[in-house]
Image (spheres, rainbow, N blue to C red):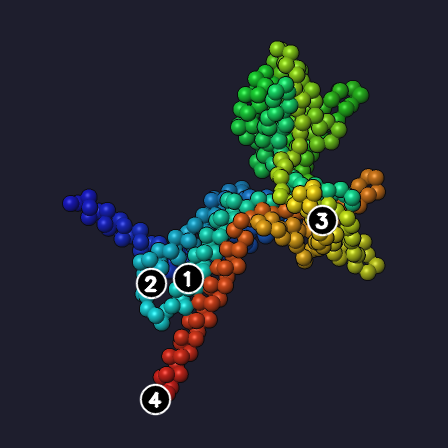
Amino acid sequence: MGTEKNFSHSLEALIKALTSFKLTLFVLASLTLLTFFGTIYQAEHGLYMAQKVFFDSLIVKDGFLILPGVRLIMWLAFLNLSAFMIFKFKYSWKKFGLIISHLGLILLLIGGFYNLHYSKESLMTLREGEQSSSSQDYYKWEIKVLGKDLVDAVPIDISSAKLKPESQEKLSKVIPELKITQFMRNGRVFETPFAGTIAKSLPLAKEYEQNQVALVFENKSGENFYLDAFEHRYFNYSDSTEQNYKLILKRTSYEIPLIIGLENVERKLHPNTQIAKSYASTVSVKTSPTDIARKAEISMNKPFRYKDYTFFQSGYGIDEDGQEFSSLAVVKNAGRLLPYIASLLTSLGLLLHSLIHLIEFIKRKSQA
């Protein structure tokens, strides 16, 4: 009996805490602080690291700064709003608009969680005249291991300073006698006249997608092997059983259901400067090699959409051969409509709430 009473009191205390207006104020104040510190952090460390440290984490730990992360705060917001609607909200037809608005806010939070876990961002870089049906991850790399009757991939993630254990475990399963001894999130392999081949770690770029992985391997005989994203993109290796492998370093790639070809890319500059005003790419789009291509223009304010995919103009450049190229950000997001639906519901609910109160006000005036 005492246990049931204690459980009942604990449940009541939990519901009271979740429906508390103080929790709502804490959520709003925390989001304000996190946005402020995150913006300052971004100026020094770049957008990607600011997202990782402040927005994708449950707890923010940076030096002496310890705060709840945005992910934790959004969970608290979801629980606060849901608990309020279930346990505290007094339902009536006069509050029908508020009910719809609250449901819209809950859907907005659900859409945020869905996008965080299931959306996928990647990059497609094309030179004029090129076409492709795949894009590359911004931050994930892989070592493609090719051997007789073997094609395998070892994942390499540069989101953390240390190599994740699963990468070494996967490599050990494929080539047991080879291990990774050095991992550089941004590095390069050099050939020197006196020291031979060396790998050097470079400062991390604020634009995190510009960082290039460098790795050093060692076998049981103490021999070193090197991989980077420049001249040392691959090496051939023979193990003690005389099994031959080829190890290739590349960004993780994703197949897309379209063949995109770059026909032309243009850059407009601000008058009398070399500062870009806008970029625009004219692309051909096909769903299969035998399909008839259609043209589309992708500019900084005009993305191209196909089913769950959205293509944004991300960048422009000229390669070492003097050929122009365009970078397209590719976002796959099956839940991209959820924020729009949630915003529509919230706005519609507020409009209905205002209309209901207006009708009530007019009725009272007419009866006076």
Q: Which residue is mark 4?
A: 368
Secondary element under disc 2, as helix, strand or loop, is: loop
Q: For the residues marked 2 and 3, what is the alpha-carbon distance in whole angstroms?
A: 55 Å
Q: Nearer the viewer, mark 2 or mark 3?
A: 3
Secondary element under disc 3, as helix, strand or loop, is: loop
Q: Quadrant of residue 275?
A: bottom right
Q: For the residues marked 3 and 4, what is the alpha-carbon distance in whole angstroms?
A: 69 Å
- Is 262 left, or right, of 344 in this rendering? right
Q: Residue furthest top?
A: 241
Give how far across and how far down residue 294 sits, in percent.
71, 51
Amino acid under disc 1: His
Amino acid under disc 2: Phe
If you read the primary sequence from the N terminus, does the residue marked by circle 4 or circle 1 appear first? 1
Q: Which residue is mark 1?
A: 102
Q: Which residue is mark 3?
A: 293
Amino acid under disc 3: Ala
Q: For the residues marked 3 and 1, what is the alpha-carbon distance in whole angstroms?
A: 45 Å
